[in-house]
Structures are given as C-alpha cells and as structure tokens.
C-alpha cells in the first residue's frame, strides 16, 4: 500500500512502546505547512492556497489517526475528515455562517451555552487532538490552542450553581479530555457538588482520534463523578479499530456508558452501507448510536453538506432492518439557536379517533384500532 515518505518516517520514529503513549501521540501531531506539503506533494503554486487555508483553519492530526488513512484512495474517508481541503476557504453555500447556531449569543458567561432550560454546555478548551475539517466550532480555532483557566471555569460553576433549573452539564470543547486531569477532576467535582446537578456528560472525540488517552487513571477519575456519560464521535466504520474499541471498553468497564454522535458528511459516510456498518459496528463494541447530525450550515464545511432528504432516506433504509439499538435519531441543530429537531421518517399515515393507519418498514399498510373510548376507560 502506498504511503507518503513522511508517514513512513513518523511511524518508524516511534521507539518501542512510544506509539501507544498518548503523550507521544499528542506531541508528534502532524501540523504545519511543510508536513502538509510533503503529505500531499503540493506543487509550488498550490502551497500559497494551503498556507491561507491553514492560517484560517488550523490542522493537527495524531500519528494514530493519520495511520488509518489509505493513501492509495484519493477519496479516503479518514483523510477527508482530517486533512485540510482548499474548499474550506473557496467554497461556500448561500446562508452558511461562522456561527449559525448562535452559540456566541447564548452565553451567559464566556464559554457556557445555555439553550435549553434544564441543561448547559460548557466549552472548556478550544484544543483538540485532531481537528475535524467538518467541525461546527471552527470559529474558535482563530485563537491559539488553550484551555480555560481555573477562574473562567469557576465562573461557569457559579452560573450553574445559581440556576436551579439546570440538571445536566455537558462538558465539551474543543475536547475536554485534552485538559489536564487535575483541572478536569476539579471542574467535574465542583459541578457534582451542586445539589440540582444530577448528571454530567462529556463530549469527546479522544476515543476515536487519540484512544491511548483513555488511560486507567483517566477512567478512575471519571468514574468518581458518576452519573457521568461519555458521548463520542465516530463517523466511519474504519474508525472502529482495536485501539478505539479498547478505549471504549475501558470506559464501559468502570461503569461509564458510551454513546455516539455521527455527523452526516458527503464523501465520508453518506451511504446506507457505510452507515449500517458504522452503527452495527458501534453496537458490537457496546457504544450506543445517539444522534446522527445533519451537517450544520457552518462556513468552511459546506463541501460536506448533503441534502437533508439524503439523511432521511438513510434512516428509512435502516429502520427495522437493523436493531433499534443501532439506530440513532437523525436531527438537525436549527439555526439561530432553535435547538435540535428530529427528522425521522414517519410510518404513521393517518390517525383519527377510531384508527391509526401505518405503513410498515417493508411496504404494507396496517390498521391499528383505537376506538373512540380507548383513552377514557369506564
Ligand atoms: C446539543 C446541545 C445540548 C444537548 O442536547 P441533547 O438533546 O440533550 O443531547 C445542550 N446544549 C446545547 C447548546 C447543545 O447544542
Ligand atoms: S473533536 Fe469535536 S470540537 Fe474538536 S475538531 Fe472535532 S468536532 Fe470539533
């Protein structure tokens, strides 16, 4: 299999044991124009475009995630997700914006998004192990890689503490599992100590792009803050490797359920076969598919967007054909902070006081009787 020389060099530069250390992976992330130019064998005339591209939208890829790329396939789905594409700066569809979900205007304190009555989302860092080209928070990459300070995190905790309606805190980023364990532990502990906070959730792509970060220490620390859920982000069946499987397994073993959100991405996973393999593969490693997201109308990601109807067709192709545990909700996060809206195909064709008429997954029509008095028993 063809591999660029740089890839061979990186792989052979790891001393025995180093490859599986997350610190080595993190500090050997592939970044910068020179590496990109070698990887893609850029011509002098292309270099300028890529320079502009990465100064607008930075890139960094862990050697591990890079190793999943098949370089002989120009349309490789892993490569599409992590290697910058000039269309990020040259292509945009009408209506796309840098922050279509209006996250920046739903922040009562910096970094904390309060959109729904009972839960908030805390952006604790703008740093990730690998920058997904389809990220809907690309706007935060303008600032250098940095986590929030203890003081900034403290302001978030104070806000949550003063709002008794908040029962769940979603810790997101960037990627919270890139933070120092001590600071994350402290942050989770302060949230947990708030009486009305019932549940914590961590949104992280680390199990997929830097699985060696899911160490025993990290699992033990997270387990102390249960009830805590981890929601991760697999987009393609080829990301389900022995390493990512083990990362999820470690979390599961300490009693942390792992669920997954997938983004529907053109050229990566916009086909029924890929989605079926992905969701069944996740069920096999005991990761519950939670959401399938329509790609947001975010500037710099428009080349990934699909027709909304494509996603509904895919859901239609999955429904009842694979088990319900493998099937996520297909949702779109509405512009202007409208929240998420589900887009599941409907099987209910008509309903009145006396009956409901359904179509079945395999094309039959079936009536369900609901005589008028059914909800008013004597
Ligand atoms: C998605 C999201 C949530 C969580 O929504 P769930 O439907 O509970 O997964 C919370 N806050 C914000 C700002 C979100 O974008
Ligand atoms: S891990 Fe999440 S926050 Fe980070 S680049 Fe990917 S999608 Fe964006």
Image (cartoon, helix red, strand yellow):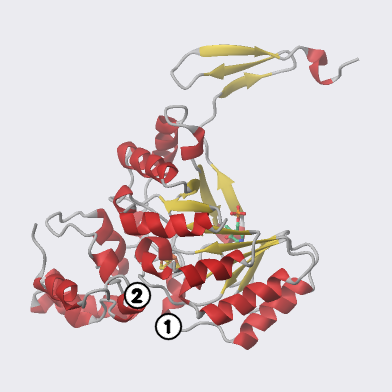
Q: Which residue is mark 1?
A: 145
Residue 304 in which image quadrant: bottom left
User: Residue sitting at 72 percent across and 59 percent down?
Assistant: 118
- Above/below status of 326 relative to 160: above
**330 and 105: which is toward the camera:** 330
**149 and 297: which is toward the camera:** 149
Percent position (x, y) of residue 143? 44, 83
Percent position (x, y) of residue 232? 47, 58
Instruction: Please indicate whether residue 99 sits to the left or right of residue 207 in the image.
Output: right
Q: Which residue is mark 2?
A: 57
Disc 1 secondary structure class: loop
Disc 2 secondary structure class: loop
How many numbered markers are drawn?
2
- Above/below status of 313 relative to 40: above
**336 and 237: which is toward the camera:** 237
- Check contact, mark 1 vs mark 2: CB within 8 A: no
User: Residue sitting at 41 percent across and 62 percent down?
Assistant: 207
Percent position (x, y) of residue 13? 17, 78
**196 and 18: which is toward the camera:** 18
Quadrant of the rendered image holding ligand 1? bottom right
Ligand 2 closer than 8 Å to label 2 CB? no
For label 2, count other residues whose C-alpha is less than 10 Å away and answer few (under 14), some (14-19) or many (20+).
Answer: some
Percent position (x, y) of residue 168? 68, 61
Task: Give the numbered dot on residue 318.
Answer: none
Q: Is residue 36 visible?
A: yes
Residue 21 in which image quadrant: bottom left
Earlier residue among tags 1 and 2 = 2
Q: Is residue 132 visible?
A: no
Instruction: Please indicate whether residue 3 sits to the left or right of residue 97 in the image.
Output: left
Q: What is the distance, in whole Å, between disc 1 and disc 2 at their CAs?
A: 12 Å
- Pair 1/2: label in front: 1
């Amino acid at each position: 299999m063809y591999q660029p020389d740089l890839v061979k060099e990186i792989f052979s530069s790891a001393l025995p044991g180093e490859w599986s250390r997350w610190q080595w992976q993190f500090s050997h992330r592939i970044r910068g124009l020179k590496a990109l130019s070698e990887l893609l064998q850029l011509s002098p005339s292309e270099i300028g475009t890529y320079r502009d591209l990465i100064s607008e939208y930075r890139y960094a890829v862990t050697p591990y995630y890079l190793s999943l790329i098949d370089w002989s396939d120009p349309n490789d789905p892993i490569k599409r997700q992590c290697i910058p594409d000039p269309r990020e700066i040259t292509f945009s569809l009408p209506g796309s914006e840098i922050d279509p979900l209006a996250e920046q205007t739903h922040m009562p304190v910096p970094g904390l998004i309060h959109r729904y009555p009972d839960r908030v989302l805390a952006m604790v860092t703008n740093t990730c192990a690998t920058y997904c080209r389809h990220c809907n928070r690309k706007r935060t990459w303008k600032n250098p890689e940095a986590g929030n300070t203890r003081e900034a995190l403290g302001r978030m905790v104070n806000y949550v503490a003063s709002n008794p309606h908040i029962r769940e805190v979603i810790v997101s980023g960037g990627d919270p599992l890139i933070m120092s364990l001590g600071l994350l532990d402290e942050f989770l502990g302060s949230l947990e100590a708030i009486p009305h906070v019932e549940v914590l959730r961590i949104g992280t792509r680390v199990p997929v792009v830097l699985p060696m970060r899911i160490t025993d220490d990290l699992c033990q620390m997270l387990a102390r803050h249960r009830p805590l859920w981890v929601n991760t982000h697999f987009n393609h069946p080829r990301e389900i490797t022995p390493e990512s499987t083990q990362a999820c397994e470690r979390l599961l073993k300490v009693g942390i359920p792992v669920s997954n959100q997938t983004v529907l991405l053109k050229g990566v996973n916009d086909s029924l076969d890929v989605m079926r393999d992905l969701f069944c593969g996740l069920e096999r490693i005991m990761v519950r598919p939670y959401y399938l997201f329509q790609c947001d109308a975010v500037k710099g990601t428009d080349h990934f967007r699909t027709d909304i109807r494509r996603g509904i067709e895919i859901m239609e192709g999955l429904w009842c054909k694979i088990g319900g545990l493998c099937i996520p909700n297909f949702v779109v996060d509405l512009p202007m902070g409208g929240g998420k809206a589900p887009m599941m195909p409907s099987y209910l064709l008509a309903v009145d006081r006396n009956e409901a008429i359904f179509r079945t997954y395999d094309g039959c029509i079936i009536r369900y009787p609901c005589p008028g008095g059914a909800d008013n028993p004597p």
